[in-house]
Image: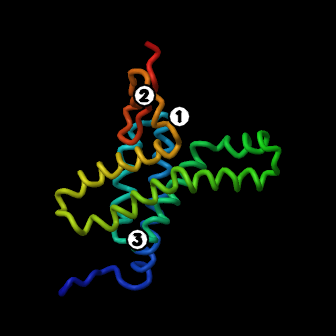
Amino acid sequence: MAGGETSWTGWPNAVARRTGPWVSVVVAAGLFALACPPYDWAWAAWAVPGLLLVPTRHLRAPVAFASGVLYAVVIGALITSWAPHAALIYFDANPLQARAFITAVHLVNPGLACGLLVCAYAVLHRRVAPAVRPLMGAWMWVASELLRVWSLGWRSSGTRSTSICRSSRSPTSAVCMPSRS
């Protein structure tokens, strides 16, 4: 094919361009959930940053932010599937109210942090050399996790004692807890 033409033309290409990033976001969230208990398949988390950031890098900033929020809501729904039932009992709410409350929680945290991560990567990836992009994505991932933890109020859990960080062998999560010494 001459002049940058592709053999895949027409509506399948347009559909793939539009749905591909969204499918990748949902698959990334599913893999993240598999890396968490009760499955503990830590290997699954290694694909998550690439599946989340690379396919969404060409989206416009607001759409990239929305895809990050979708990622967070799907993770929340998969990891904390018990949460709507707990809210139902705790708040003596009906099932619709309980699900709406839990979805709102996931929209705020981790939704904002994940939305900002994907949006920032989509905006900044064009401004750095291709060789630097993986490192930039990794540090942006760390920053988004710190934002998420800070917004939950966990920032002071180890201020009066030595912190012990426990990793689940997963590149995307570590839990820091105060030591008992």
Residue at 44% in and 19% down = 179
Question: In the image, is residue 10 above or below residue 83?
Answer: below
Determine the CA span between mark 2 and mark 3. 36 Å
**Residue 24: image location, x then y, percent:** 43, 60
- The numbered mark, 2 or 3, whose residue comes first in the sequence reads 3
Which residue is more in the foreground, 74 or 158?
Answer: 158
Dot placed on the residue nearer the N-terminal end, 2 or 1: 1
Q: Which residue is mark 1?
A: 37
* Distance Cα–Cα, label 2 vs label 1: 27 Å
Give the residue displayed 38% in from the left and 56% down from the top. Answer: 51
Residue on which disc 2 sits: 159
Relative to residue 103, is residue 113 drawn left or right? left
Return the residue at label 3: 61
User: In the picture, which quadrant includes the C terminus?
Assistant: top left
Q: Amino acid at mark 1?
A: Pro
Which mark is drawn over residue 11?
Answer: none
Q: Amino acid at mark 2?
A: Thr
Q: Nearer the viewer, mark 2 or mark 3?
A: 2
Q: Name the amino acid, label 3.
A: Ala
Q: Quadrant of the N terminus?
A: bottom left
Q: Picture coordinates of residue 150 (x, y %)? A: 46, 43
Could you say where residue 165 lies in the image, as x and y percent from the top left? 39, 27
